[in-house]
Amino acid sequence: MVRIVAVSLSDIAERAGVSVKTVSGALHGGSARMSDDKRQKVKAIAEELGYVTNLAARGVRQGWLPLVGVVSDGLITSPFATEIVRGLDGAARSAGMAVFAVNHRSGQSIGSVLDEVQQFRPRAVAYAAMYHKDVALPDRLAGAVGVMINCREATGRVTALVPDEEGGAREIVRYLLVAGRRRIAFINLPGILAGTLREMGFRAALGEAGIDHVGVFPAVRRSVYSDRAPSLVASHVEALLKSGQRPDAILCGNDRVAMEVYAALARAGLRIPDDIAVASFDNQVEIASRLDPPLTTMALPHRAMGRLAMEILLTEQPEPPHLHKLPFHLVERASV
């Protein structure tokens, strides 16, 4: 019978010529001040000796496991989930941590979901939403969430990472203006925070340039945007083309709206961008890159939000709660 001898932190410390505390920090992400060279040396020795972390013992000793829990408010069903999770997971692995998510189902209280996450004894907990919105956390739970991702706590008690919607709209409008477009219409997403902020940026950028917009129009018939709501896009495009101020550019609330604008302009026999330029938000690559011509759009900073969220969750000296707006990235394609 083969006898397996467990390798301890002390064994690694003796071989590396460092303290047990240093070994623990290198392997478990507990030391932010350690040099990369020292961290890699300790990890290499641990691997050579065949060290395996005893997660159960570590959880009892520290009060938490090397896990980061994510309360997913619809995120799992979002096309952007992959980017946020990649950002979280990449940063977590670098710190010797793992990420797990629990879905916040419709009708389920936030408190019950957080209680479910806490059963796994994670080191930290994040709350991530599928779209930019305000979330009201119960008083007793505000301190349990380390960071909000793609959403903000309604009273500002938790650090929040959100896209700079207003700044992104300003940037794409300025891009259209530099391209020589002066009659710009906006088919926006009604009733949601992202749409409200993007409209503010749209109006501000045109105001700075001393140019009036052609109009701001809701993409759907309902008061709150949903991609399943009856669309108004085709009727808006038809009316704009018949108006005395036909636009030379149409800004779209998201890439799905842009896809409908493409179809409406094609039916009218107009070419993009020769007759009318089209630009958008989100950069859903499966849509934006496959349209003809490919769509110029503002990419959401989801991966950056995931990386920064993990850095905030694992820091040993957290800053006071604040709202952090991350910039969009302009993806230039052939529609402008």
Image: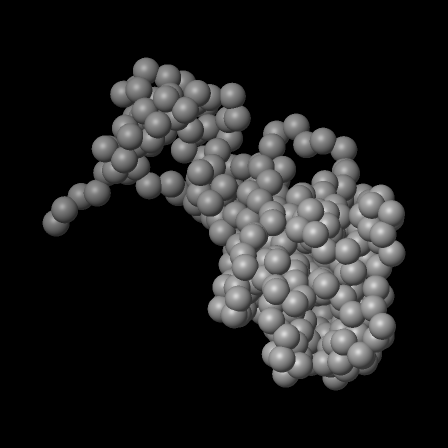
**Residue at position x 33%, y 31% in the image:** 43
Q: Position of residue 303 (x, y in %)?
A: 55, 49
Lateral position of residue 144 relative to residue 269, left or right: right
Q: Nearer the viewer, residue 23 or 277?
A: 277
Q: Position of residue 68 (x, y in %)?
A: 55, 48
The quadrant where residue 64 appears: top right
Lateral position of residue 237 relative to residue 299, left or right: right
In the current view of this chain or complex, which residue is farthest to the left?
1
Q: Nearer the viewer, residue 72 or 78?
A: 78
**Residue at position x 72%, y 81% in the image:** 234
Q: Quadrant of the C terminus?
A: bottom right
Q: Position of residue 195 (x, y in %)?
A: 78, 61
For the rendered model, the colour scheme is one colour
Q: Position of residue 252 (x, y in %)?
A: 70, 65
Q: Nearer the viewer, residue 335 or 68?
A: 335
Lateral position of residue 205 relative to residue 43, left or right: right
**Residue at position x 14%, y 46% in the image:** 2
Is residue 53 among what the camera can see?
Answer: yes
**Residue at position x 64%, y 48% in the image:** 328
In the current view of this chain or complex, which residue is farthest to the top?
17
Is residue 110 among what the camera can see?
Answer: no
Q: Nearer the viewer, residue 98 or 184?
A: 184
Considering only vertical position in the picture, is 63 above or below 79? above
Considering only vertical position in the picture, is 41 above or below 217? above
Q: How many marks?
A: 0
